[in-house]
Image (spheres, coloured by chain):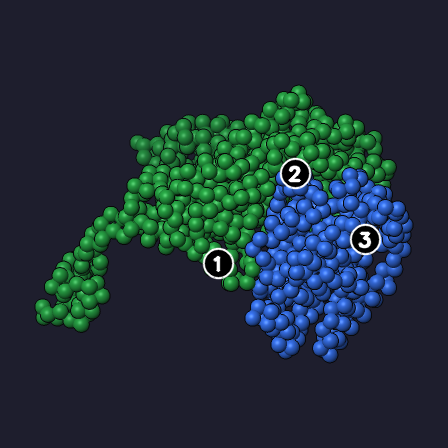
Chain colours: A green, B blue
Amino acid sequence: MVTFLLEVGTEELPASFVADALNQWRSRIPASLAESFLSSESIQFYGTPRRLAVLIAGLPTQQPDREEEVKGPSAQAAFKDGKPTKAAEGFARSRGIAVADLAVRSTDKGDFVFVRQQIAGRPTAEILTELVPQWIFGLEGKRFMRWGDGDLRFPRPIRWLVSLLDEAVLPIRLVNGSESCTSDRISQGHRVLHPDPVLIPSAAQYVECLRQAFVEVDPAQREAQIVAQAEKAARSVKGVATINPGLLAEVRDLVEYPTAVVGQFDPEFLELPPEVITTEMESHQRYFPIRKAADRPTLLPYFITIANGDPAKTDLIAAGNQRVIRARLSDGKYFFDLDRKQSLEDYLPRLETVTFQADLGSVRAKVDRMGEIAQMIGSQLQVNAATQSAIDRATLLCKADLVTQMVGEFPELQGVMGEKYARSSGESEAVATAIFEHYLPRGAHDQLPLTLGGQVVGIADRLDTLIGIFSIGMVPSGSSDPFALRRAATAIVNITWAANLELNLEQLLHQAVSAFLAGSTPPKTDAASLLQQLQEFFLQRVRTLLQEDRSIDYDLVNAVLGESDPDYTARALQNLLDVRDRAEFLQSIRQNGQLTAIYETVNRASRLAAQGTLDKTTLEPTGLIDPRQFQQPSEQAFYEALIQLVPETQAAQAERNYQRLVDALANIAPVVSQFFDGSTSVLVMDENLDIRQNRLNLLGLLRNQARVLADFGAIVKGE
Amino acid sequence: MNFQSVIATLHQFWSDRGCLIVQPYDTEKGAGTKSPHTFLRALGPEPWSVAYVEPCRRPADGRYGENPNRVQHYYQYQVLIKPSPENILDIYLDSLKALGIKPEDHDIRFVEDNWEDAAVGAWGVGWEVWLDGMEITQFTYFQQCGGIDCRPVSIEITYGLERLTMYLQEVNSIFDIRWNDRLTYGDVHLQGEIEGSKYNFEASDPDLLFTLFKLFEQDAERLMKASLVLPAFDQVLKCSHTFNLLDARGVISVTERARYIGRIRSLARQVAQLYVKQREELGFPLLKESQAQAA
């Protein structure tokens, strides 16, 4: 058994690439060894900004010998009249055996010639020499570069290679133009703390040798050290370190020898909104902020930086960082003070100079369109006058912060600053909060707006974007969705669902599209096709959300949304809450077995009803059904049951309490059975066409009642 | 160490390492990269090592002299070496030592920072160098310039002279930098910042600038047809600066912006191609020179 070490020494890699590369190796190297018939006891992956390494223990010194069977030509081609043909001779020659050693075996594609051969295992060293370059250059990532005068590509220049099989150097050479790099046992330590080369006597000593040279090669170790040190550092100033996981991973791969350094800044900067300070620290300086308590946003005037320098020099390092953060916070304070010299409303005229989209005018124009949509939503939701005026105000001001200095500097603070500036301009709490919330959710796992104002303005904003961008034909296709329209439509549905807004999206789309087209922008599309595209787009989002986020079976989603059934698609958009409730209810009755109980009855009725002429929406039997045509008591019973069913169905839909409908359908099932199969059963397709239609109408009415819940025909099986 | 000593030290340092020390180029530009000493010389197979100070203009960064860290006119110290040498990071750390910064006393980090200047069809990968959390230098391995692959690859090192000097002098405002023992950076440049900002944001004449852009563009095309590569490049630089002035004035919308950048890029690409062709026709003289040196 031997241990193999490969270390690829580089100039400082992008932090994100280190973990990414090790993950690629984690899946590829074991597979690559297995393909080469090499087993191993353990494989460790190491990486720092300056190196990627793999340590494989328990490798055999050579591959095991093995027997291989190789398929040759078909028996028909290999032998003519029992004699070997040229094809057989050629195959035998290519495998280095005699024709006599060829065997014929049948396969499901006919008889073929086979040869079994003993293959002697090759030395592990020889195989590794072939595999290592594949491992190195098989790595993938963004923005690979060339360097010097060569053609090699890697994220940063490769400067050395260590390749050891136990104590022995396994020679590997990379040539890059006029430079070359030959593997050795010489690694590099920390760039400034250990400038001398590091000799690695044997593969197994790798981690320890580098630790001596101020390099912790194990990312997990570095991460643990950073967390422990940061927490300790925060305690030293009686606070709690805020360690954002993404930032932790980045910082871990920016240093080889982490030391937490605490710095402080003038408490006067705490007047700045904590979001500003945190953004400066995290995004720009890669610092961990320190809070008073884990559950409160209040910051302390300290920060933690994870240095890659000498722990003995932390005072000097802290002093330098303090000057940097001071300059940055001064900038922030300058912007904050300057921005507040005007009220938020004063920024509105400048929004006219900010282009939303070339064909759709300025952000100011967008805000006006949003205002109209917000009013449409408000009237649908029947909000009172005071609420509507807060919504109107929030809509008007929600983009004003885009032209402030602070948001110009930190675009990620849009909305956050709007809220602060609204408050300092004397706007109401509802307006300020709505300005912040209208951007929510900002990503897949972000919070949703909690106030009605935030919800309405957020929907109006996204709806305007959708209508505008669709109107100029920039419809998302495949992976290309530059305006994030899918995310916008998804957010509208999610906000409606989470807040249980009684929103009629179909009507809203209708009104908003008309208003948009009546506006100044010359449309590139007509109202009908624009509406249709938007409706389909929203339905697709609803479908995806039900299936993927809410785990509803695809056939049940089809049953509530209809594949191309305008009754259903229109209804879904008219009442997003209803379509969600019906889908979830169907899923629940599939699980508790109630679906099975009514499935057969409803489906049998629906199949037959399809031969009749009844539309799909009539529910009321009175006037439609002619009792004089009844031949059997089962028809009368069916009729009476349907009359009783109508109020249940209507109540179920009005209350979105579909259990009522399912219970009623379950009750009617025995009556329908009597009608089909009981002692007084009837033949639906009677020769008398009036009697036939009357019976088909009974069935049609049952189908229509069930359709209030779902199209049972789309449900795959009633389980 | 005062501002002029920082420059003198870097000149001496890079001169000792074989760099040609040249003077700033006399056309307005946004970065040292756009100087022909870098932009054109990074193209083609000829070896090149150069160091120079370059005044840079970023009209949109003007703050009327009120911001201690941001100005619309500043200086970069620019080094370009082709092909990129193997030990360039160590050489760079030595340059910090020459300035009196002992790397072992500090936290020095090389943080990924890729560079792209769409307006001149150029991109590269590299780092910003952090000294105790302050960005003091940009490193870039040039991959493309004017839309042409850089072969061999050049390494570009750009020191932020003001940042570096502020660090060395422990001052918190760019205007407090001691230029020599008597005068400060503010003595030299504060009035220029105030007036420059006023010009960039308020007093420039957009109509005139739009006209100038068109004229410079036409002239660049005319000069390229006449195979006058370097004069054509001057016109491209003027287009680029005129565009920056228009942009600072806020008179270019987002889509127009992309179109203007596209026009400059197209010119830059053509000049880059003509330059390579011209050098080839001259027989790549610096390649011959270096082969003669080696022999």
Give residue B291's quadrant in the image: bottom right
Residue B37: x, y in percent? 71, 64
Q: Mark 1 lies on which chain?
A: A
Name the N-terminal-most of marks 2 and 3. Answer: 3
Provide the residue designation for mark 1.
Answer: A180
Give me the C-alpha separation between circle 2 and circle 3: 29 Å
On-image quarter of the N terminus of chain B: top right
Q: Which of A57 and A628 is in front in this view?
A: A57
**Element under disc 1:** strand
* Residue B73, disc: 3
Residue B238: x, y in percent? 79, 65
Left or right, A273 with respect to A171, comes to right
Q: Residue furthest top?
A: A238
Residue A113: x, y in percent? 17, 62
Q: Would residue B131 be visible to someone looking at this image? A: yes
Give residue A574's quadrant in the image: top right
What type is the residue that disc 3 sits on?
His
Left or right, A251 with respect to A330, comes to left
Number of residues whose C-alpha sits closer than 10 Å to that of mark 1, classed few (under 14), some (14–19) or many (20 or more): few
On-image quarter of the C terminus of chain B: bottom right
Provide the residue designation for mark 2.
Answer: B106
The mark closer to the camera, 2 or 3, is: 2
Q: Which of A628 and B60 is in front in this view?
A: B60
